[in-house]
Amino acid sequence: MAKIGLGVNVYEAARQRIAWTFDTFPRIYVSFSGGKDSTVMLHMVMDEAIARRRKVGVLFVDLEGQYRLTIDHIQECYDLYAEHIEPYWVALPIHLRNAVSAYEPQWVCWQPDRRDDWIRQPPAGAITDPAQFPFYRYAMEFEDFVPGFGHWYAGDELTACFVGIRSDESLNRWRTIAGHGNKWDGEHKYTQWMSQTLWNVYPIYDWRVDDIWTYHGKRGRPYNKLYDLMHKAGLSLSQMRICQPYGDDQRRGLWLFHLIEPDTWARVVARVNGANGGALYIQESGNMTGYRSISKPEGHTWQSFAILLLESLPPRTQEHFENKIATFVHWWQVRGYPDGIPDEADPEDEAAKRAPSWRRVCKALLRNDYWCKGLSFSQHKSGAYERYLKVMKNRRAKWGV
């Protein structure tokens, strides 16, 4: 897809998009994370809101195990714009991925029965009562809560949600923004239809990371000081992630947590299973983490090594992976591999997911790739997993896998 110049710089383009949104939507809120992109967007949206004397909602979903500096920054922004926002600082039990433990592959923040182990207390004014949101279910997935909030906030009124993502951050984000269809009037490429009354708006979608830091440098607005410490620690701009560092992608930065915030880290180790081991070994490659090249023990095939790895897992985690692997094997059996998948295939074809192999399975197990994204799966919707287990039990009996 060719780039089309707009004839203005990205700052002016973002201002125009924000102004159009205020002209078009009677109800507006910001999805705020405290990161560098999200913060630029919040400041720009608030400039427009204050000029128009309009209040906007600001949603922050507090996941408990986050950097103290991020929480301080978010509080700073809430205080700065207190007279002009509807604050929604949510501290409810949410189901989260824990990629550093096979024994607790998921964890729930703000669990009422783990109150004594909480990494910190929610701030005054945070929403801790589940009754606040009729759509909320205990320990629902973060990915379900965010759109659920949007639909609840919009109700029957046309509503825009500002989201501070950029297309050059990742292929998935580029697809989200550049996807055809579901655009306002088919022309506003920075919008995305979510429901009859709710639209997402991406005002800084075409900014690069240099534009983000140019804004922070020139405007002098509050920003997350965590980035300063990450820079001093030698991280590149692309490595600086402020989200809770236990997910499949984020865990590569787990080693940094105990260096930047040792006091917070002490409580994280007690709260999140596998955090300390993850910090020690996540930078390793090979069989330790499943990154780069891996090797099988002497005397094993990749298939027998996969079985050995499965047998070392806790029962529920083992069943989860076995279901995924059975589906993976069956899918390829009916697509050109009737006698089963090979032990290994061309490494380039494996990396591009064009060919199946037991080596791919081993890599997923060594990485603790819980949702088996390396085998081309995606995450289940919350509430459907128990039904999935029952369905898979019947399917595996039918397939004989």
Image: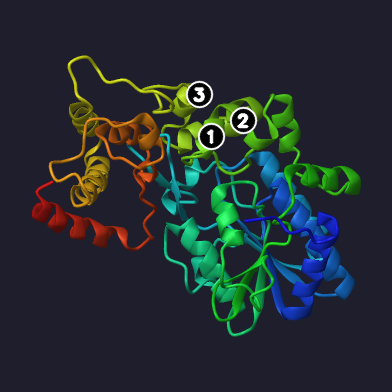
Question: Three-letter amino acid code at disc 2?
Answer: Asp
Question: Three-letter amino acid code at disc 3?
Answer: Gln
Horizontal side of 43 relative to 348 (left or right) equals right
Q: Earlier in the sequence, mark 1 or mark 3?
A: 1
Question: Three-letter amino acid code at disc 1?
Answer: Arg
Mark linked to residue 395: none
Horizontal side of 196 relative to 97 (left or right) equals right
Q: Position of residue 170 (x, y in %)?
A: 58, 46
Quick one: SS at disc 1? helix
Quick one: SS at disc 2? helix
Q: Residue at x 47, y 26 (%)?
A: 282
Horizontal side of 392 relative to 45 (left or right) equals left
Q: Is residue 382 visible?
A: yes
Horizontal side of 395 relative to 125 (left or right) equals left
Q: Residues within 10 Å of mark 3 (few under 14, many from 20)?
A: some
Q: Earlier in the sequence, mark 3 or mark 2?
A: 2
How far apart are the alpha carbons under marks 1 and 3?
22 Å
How far apart are the alpha carbons under marks 1 and 2?
7 Å
Q: Residues within 10 Å of mark 2 (few under 14, many from 20)?
A: few
Q: Residues within 10 Å of mark 1 (few under 14, many from 20)?
A: some
Asked whether 288 or 93 is in front, the reply is 288
Q: Residue at x 59, y 31 (%)?
A: 257
Mark 3 or mark 2: which is in front? 3
Whether the residues at callouts 1 and 3 have beta carbons within 8 Å, the answer is no
Q: Position of residue 13 (x, y in %)?
A: 81, 62
**Mark 3 sits on what residue?**
283
Mark linked to residue 267: 1
**Mark 2 sits on what residue?**
263
Seen from this angle, which residue lies furthest front?
A: 2
Asked whether 365 or 111 is in front, the reply is 365
